[in-house]
Image (spheres, rainbow, N blue to C red):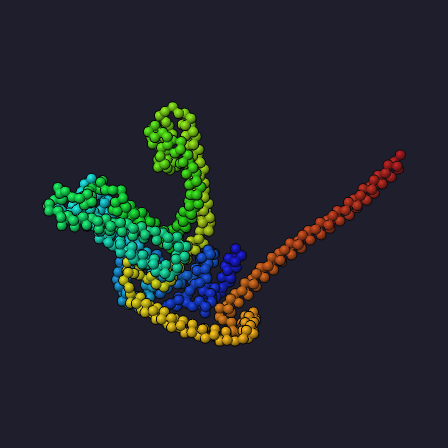
């Protein structure tokens, strides 16, 4: 916490852009800017890795990030939301033409605009929105129901095998496959650039990997079903002379592909493909949450949702323990009464799982524990266990989960601005790196710039190999000369090198970065000293006030004692006078 407060305090003392860039980018001589003169932002990446949220959300840091975000689009930054929405609409309509222009002229003014992080974000968001539209469009022909029932077969001609018609890919599915291939290629480039370990550390990458893997498995199973149906169609074309194959006698493995859906095997590749496709569609729409931090209104909600998912995973550990305990216990109690109950609840492991799971939502009945026989002991134990389960799960654990979610939401709500800016910075940084300018599926076509970079890399690899051989030869010569020296000379040389390494040489010519950091640290130390002196002055004033109060108290006590003495003397004098007057009267 002290280190976090220190970096935020130093960033708060920056007075110009040069000092802010020095803190955010580090030593520019050691970390040179990337291509197209874009800062490396090494310190921001490090702060995001270790979640130094106040540093990332600092106004100086956000100002630098905003400048890079609207690179080559300085006029768009001050525009209203309506103008930005029109820009997004224009990119949506003209995305294919912009991709073609970038293929032809990647280094032109238009290419520089498309390489800006904001335009990359808009292009990728538009591409993913079109992908989701294709998923909806692919199911639009079944919105009002399918044409044929599960027990019916419809073919284009009498000699067509039914499964050939059902396994063919539609044009929307072919477009979806192209988008999936483009996203796979983009993920492969990200893994190559960041490394597998860094790639897996981000949960959104894991979601992308799972979504694309399920899409690939679904299309592969569908393609396998199409191949088998095509082989059956080929057999019919070559060996069946009948005009209508419904009246022909076919082998069992060929006749299977003419059956209606209600006669398919549960492990049929087409059924598996449809199930996997449904899961992939759900994961695809959940991917929308990735771009929500770009908006100030939806960003905190997305952060709260992510924190809620983490709380649910923590809660699942206790939930699974309690759930499995009662599921096995109730199954052991009622497994001997299969057919002797009013419903099959708890008679098998599957029924036990279903009954206990749906009872959490109030969809199970108490009759699930009642027997047809007069075995009251078993029924009473069943009532007790079922009641304890409902109290434990519904009253205790679910309310505990609600309390955890509420606590997480309150934590985020109390510091919503910092949380949102930190999440937005993470989103922005993913578009700051060079490359991946064109979204899927336009990234499948290599650009001339890609061939240029490929030639440069091949050339650099060849140069490194040649230099490596030369260095190896020189090292071998040096090692031979060292081995030929006497041991005493070698020992002296080693001692001399160690002494040179131990001696700290003063910096004679400090770099610009070192001068800036020295100036900032001096400023920070002076501010800390001033704050401490102010604190000390306040403490001294408090001590002086205490001393004044105590001295005033002593003075009041002395005056009181003096006044009391004087009053006693007056009373004595009065008493003496009254005594004298009394003696004179008789």
Q: Quadrant of residue 431?
A: bottom left
Nearest to the observer: residue 561 or residue 404? 404
Nearest to the observer: residue 256 or residue 551? 256
Q: Is residue 17 at least partly visible in the picture?
A: no
Q: Residue at x 27, y 67 (%)?
A: 104
Q: Is residue 6 at least partly visible in the picture?
A: yes
Q: Residue at x 36, y 64 (%)?
A: 434
Looking at the picture, does residue 323 appear above or below residue 112? above
539 displayed left or right of 113? right
Horizontal and vertical percent for residue 510?
Answer: 51, 71
6 displayed left or right of 446? right
Position of the C terminus, as image quadrant, is top right
Looking at the picture, does residue 259 appear above or below residue 461? above
Q: Residue at x 42, y 74 (%)?
A: 473
Horizontal and vertical percent for residue 535?
Answer: 60, 57
Horizontal and vertical percent for residue 338?
Answer: 34, 30
Nearest to the observer: residue 449 or residue 583? 449
Horizontal and vertical percent for residue 176?
Answer: 26, 53
Q: Residue at x 50, y 59 (%)?
A: 8
Looking at the picture, does residue 206 appear above or below residue 101? above
Nearest to the observer: residue 533 or residue 552? 533
493 displayed left or right of 450? right
Q: Quadrant of residue 148?
A: top left
Q: How many marks?
A: 0
């Amino acid at each position: 916490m002290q280190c976090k407060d220190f970096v935020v305090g130093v960033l708060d003392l920056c007075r110009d852009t040069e000092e802010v860039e020095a803190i955010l980018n580090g030593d520019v001589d050691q970390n040179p800017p990337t291509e197209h003169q874009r800062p490396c932002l090494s310190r921001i990446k490090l702060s995001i890795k270790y979640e130094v949220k106040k540093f990332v959300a600092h106004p100086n840091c956000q100002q630098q990030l905003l400048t890079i975000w609207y690179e080559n689009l300085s006029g768009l930054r001050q525009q209203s939301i309506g103008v930005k929405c029109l820009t997004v609409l224009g990119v949506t309509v003209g995305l294919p033409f912009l991709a073609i222009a970038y293929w032809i002229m990647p280094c032109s003014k238009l290419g520089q605009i498309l390489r800006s992080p904001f335009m990359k974000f808009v292009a990728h968001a538009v591409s993913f929105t079109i992908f989701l539209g294709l998923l909806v469009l692919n199911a639009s022909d079944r919105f009002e129901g399918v044409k044929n029932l599960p027990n019916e077969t419809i073919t284009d001609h009498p000699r067509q095998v039914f499964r050939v018609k059902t396994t063919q890919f539609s044009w929307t599915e072919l477009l979806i496959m192209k988008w999936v291939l483009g996203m796979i290629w983009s993920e492969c480039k990200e893994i190559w650039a960041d490394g597998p370990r860094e790639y897996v550390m981000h949960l959104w990458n894991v979601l992308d990997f799972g979504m694309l893997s399920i899409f690939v498995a679904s299309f592969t199973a569908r393609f396998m079903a199409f191949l088998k149906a095509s082989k059956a169609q080929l057999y019919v074309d070559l060996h069946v002379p009948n005009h209508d194959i419904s009246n022909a006698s076919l082998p069992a493995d060929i006749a299977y592909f003419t059956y209606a859906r209600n006669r398919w095997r549960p492990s049929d590749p087409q059924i598996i493909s449809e199930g996997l496709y449904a899961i992939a569609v759900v994961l695809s729409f959940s991917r929308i949450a990735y771009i929500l931090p770009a908006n100030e209104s939806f960003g905190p909600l997305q952060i709260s949702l992510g924190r809620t998912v983490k709380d649910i995973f923590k809660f699942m550990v206790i939930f699974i323990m309690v759930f499995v305990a009662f599921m096995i216990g109730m199954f052991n109690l009622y497994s001997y009464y299969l057919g002797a109950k009013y419903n099959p609840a708890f008679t098998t492991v599957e029924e036990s799982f279903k009954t206990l799971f749906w009872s959490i939502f109030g969809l199970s009945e108490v009759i699930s524990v009642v027997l047809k026989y007069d075995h009251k002991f078993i029924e009473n134990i069943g009532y007790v266990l079922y009641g304890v389960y409902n109290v434990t799960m519904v009253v205790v654990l679910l309310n505990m989960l609600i309390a955890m979610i509420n606590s997480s939401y309150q934590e985020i709500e109390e510091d919503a601005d910092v949380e949102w800016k930190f999440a937005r910075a993470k989103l922005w940084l993913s578009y700051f790196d060079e490359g991946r300018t064109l979204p899927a599926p336009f990234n499948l076509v290599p650009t001339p710039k890609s061939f240029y970079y490929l030639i440069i890399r091949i050339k650099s690899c060849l140069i490194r190999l040649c230099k490596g051989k030369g260095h190896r030869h020189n090292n071998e010569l040096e090692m031979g000369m060292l081995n030929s020296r006497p041991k005493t000379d070698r020992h002296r040389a080693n001692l001399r090198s160690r002494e040179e390494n131990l001696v700290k040489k003063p910096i004679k010519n400090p770099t610009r970065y070192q001068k800036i950091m020295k100036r900032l640290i001096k400023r920070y130390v002076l501010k800390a000293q001033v704050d401490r002196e102010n604190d000390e002055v306040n403490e001294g004033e408090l001590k002086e006030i205490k001393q004044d109060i105590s001295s005033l108290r002593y003075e009041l006590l002395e005056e009181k004692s003096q006044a009391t003495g004087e009053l006693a003397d007056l009373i004595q004098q009065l008493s003496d006078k009254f005594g004298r007057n009394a003696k004179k009267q008789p």
